[in-house]
Every structure is written in structure tokens, then in C-alpha cells.
Amino acid sequence: MFLGTERKHTKTCVLVFVLLPFAIGKIEPQSGAICRSSSGLQGMCVLLKHCPKLRAILDKPYINRQENNLLTGAEGACPPESEQFCCADGDIRWDTRSTTKLPKRSWTTVKIKEDNAPGDEDCLQTRLGMSSESFGRASLGTSFGVFITYTGKTKLSRCVGSLITPEYVLTVAHCVREPYRNRIVLYVNAQRVTFDPVLEMLQGDVNPTYVREVIIHKEYNRTTYDHDIALLQLNETIARGGYGSPTPICIPLGATHDENASAGRTLSCFGWGVNANGDPSNRKQWVTLERISQQLCQARMDELMVALVHRVLVTERNICTITITGHDAFAGYSGGPLMYRKEGTWFLIGLISFGVDTTSSEFPVVSTNVQQYTDWIVDVIRSRQGRK
């Protein structure tokens, strides 16, 4: 929820930003589409693990605008939804264990080290009896992303969630509180959404999933957005499958983020919200954000005292970010995962909670600090595991 005037958007989305992720699975799509790299060289559309030059950029803790544009252009040069990037011929390195069928051309074969799955001690899910294989290397993709839609009293609403176990989705409380909870529909691993004029509702490009129970943090405050977190128990277990199938994202344990998530570092988020022009996106869009300190965030929020009804208090239960591109986690991104990538795996540390206005990038966006709620998440899920 963004503080400010609510707006109903009906415009067609324009493609905006930023970096699209990649996925690595046991069954890969074939490579071979010829493309032209941003440097003007002939190349081929491949998964990023076969292009060390581009992959090295994603492994950096910081991504500058030039690098971001390079990755965006490389993705845009390949067929849509292929999850492949245009890599110059000379930069391609094939894994000797790959079963990908290649064109009859001469290639340099270099064995690539596999991405590391998170260790058993790294993720909250291990406390729930899940093995690292259940949420590890597959998290290289973003199949854990969930489009959440519901019909409110005056408009259609859209939010975002993250699959954290095969049966639970994590999101923010203000997206699923009364009176919406009986009209919530989820689309796990959706990429695009459309409006159905007959049903008068938004639909994803995958089969819908419904909610058995909505569990909102008991201390959630609708006025201050404190403890803005909720769990959605699904009415069916999300099955694991082959390439691109939904796989839970890792929630790192501990109350303190590691260096990759500290103030000054860049974080990623995605959603189906509006851009800086107020146009809604019907395709999953990405934003790259910079984390700022709590002190700076509080100072920026205090500048709004005249415009806001109450003072916004930033605590250890919050994470604050600012945009580095002009496009931010605006309206429609609520519940979206604030995350970083380390050793090939996505780590979820925050949930987009609120901002100042629907399209203002002048002030910080405040997210719920998920690592402050790891005990709550575990307790909620464990208390329901024996009810079946």
C-alpha cells in the first residue's frame, strides 16, 4: 500500500525496466538462435551459465547502469520468455556435461563449475524439515514469484507474494486483510496477467491457486503498517517438476543480513505494478534498488511530516530502499520480494510494504524485514503441520 491518492489504472503497459533473471534446471531449452550482441558481434542465445562474461556481472554485489543496460539488451535480443541472453560467439563456454543439442559449429569446451546450492544451515526452510534440494539451485530462476489478485469494493487490486514452501506463500498483511481474504486468487510462477472482461477480474498465464487460510501477524497495525506480514496456506501443495517449475525461495536465517544485503548494496525486486508514468504492467517487471540506512530513511520520512497524517517510524523491523534508475517499487508491488543473489541462489530478506505515493521516486520505499519474523514463520507453519 502506498501513502497517497489511490488510482484506478486502465492504460496499456509499456515495457520499462530492468534486469530479468535466469534459470538453470535439469532440462534446458535448446540453444541456437542467432543474435547480435550489444557490441555488434554475432552471437547465440544461451542460458547465462554458458556466458561467463555476462554471468560475472550478475555475481557482482553492485550493478551499475551501463552493466544493467548491457544485460537488458542481451536479454532483449533473444526470443521472449526463452530466459536466454545473447552472448558473443567468442564468449560462449559449454559445460562438458551439458546435454544441450548444439549446431554443427566449432566451440571451445570448458568445464563450468556448477552453482552452489545453499547449505543446510543457511535457510529457514531447513527448520521445517525441508532439504536444501527442495529450494536450492532451482532458485536461480524466479519460479517462486506469485501474482496475487483480488476484487475490492471499488477496484481490482494486485499484489505479489513468494512461495516459501510447497504449501505456503509469504506476502504483506495489507494485501490479504479483511474484506479481501475471501476473494483472493494466486498465480504461482506467473509471467503475464490479463483482464477478463467477462469475469471482471485479472488472471495470470498459469492455473489459479486458492487459499485455505490467511494468517496475519497478530500485531499488524493498519495505520502504521507495523508487522506488515502474512502467510497464505494454499489449498493444494505446489508440485515440483522439471525445468522452470515453482520452487521455494530461500529465507536466510539469523537477525543480521550478510554483507550482500547491507546499506549501500543493490537489491532486486519484481512485480506487476505501475511505472514512473503511472502505467500498470501486465508483464513481470524488475527493479533494482539500493538499500539505505535506517537513519537516512527516517530523516527522509521526517521531511514529509506536513504531508502525512502521522509520523512514519522506521525500526529494525523495516528495510528502506531508494531507486537507482527512476523506476521504483510503486503501487502494485506490495508484498514483492526484496532479495539478493549469492552463489547462484536468491535470498529473500524483505517484503515491499509502503511508499509515499503511487509514482513518486523522491522518497524511500519501506519494506518489512523478513529476518525479524523467522521464528513467527516457523511457529505458524509448524502449528499447522499436524492438522491434516
Image: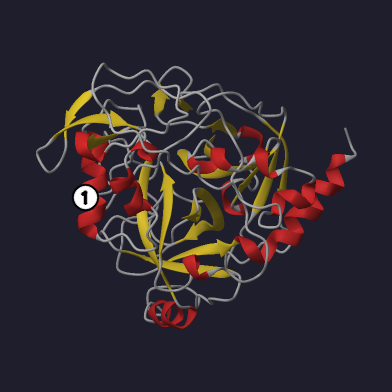
Where residue 360 sits, quadrant-wise, is bottom left
90 or 275, which is in the foreground?
90
Residue at the image point whose x is 51% and y is 59% from the top: 353
Residue 101 occupies quadrant: top left
Q: Above or below — where is 330 with respect to 8?
A: below
User: At which x and y percent is residue 95?
Assistant: 41, 33
Q: Residue at x 23, y 21 (%)?
A: 105
Choose top left, top right, bottom left or bottom right for residue 63.
Answer: bottom left
Residue 376 shown left or right of residue 303 in the figure:
right
Residue 318 is situated, as x and y percent measured from the top left of the image, at: 55, 69
Circle 1 crowding by C-alpha within 10 Å: few under 14, some 14–19, many from 20: some
Which residue is farthest left? 40
Say whether residue 273 is left or right of residue 169: left
Examine the rendering and report whether any part of residue 42 can be seen: yes
In this view, the residue in front, 312 or 96, is 96
Pick the residue in front: 202 or 107. Answer: 107
Residue 2 lies, in percent from the top left, at 44, 58
The residue beneath circle 1 is 69
Badge 1 amino acid: Asn
Residue 18 visible in the snapshot: no
For the C terminus, which image quadrant? top right
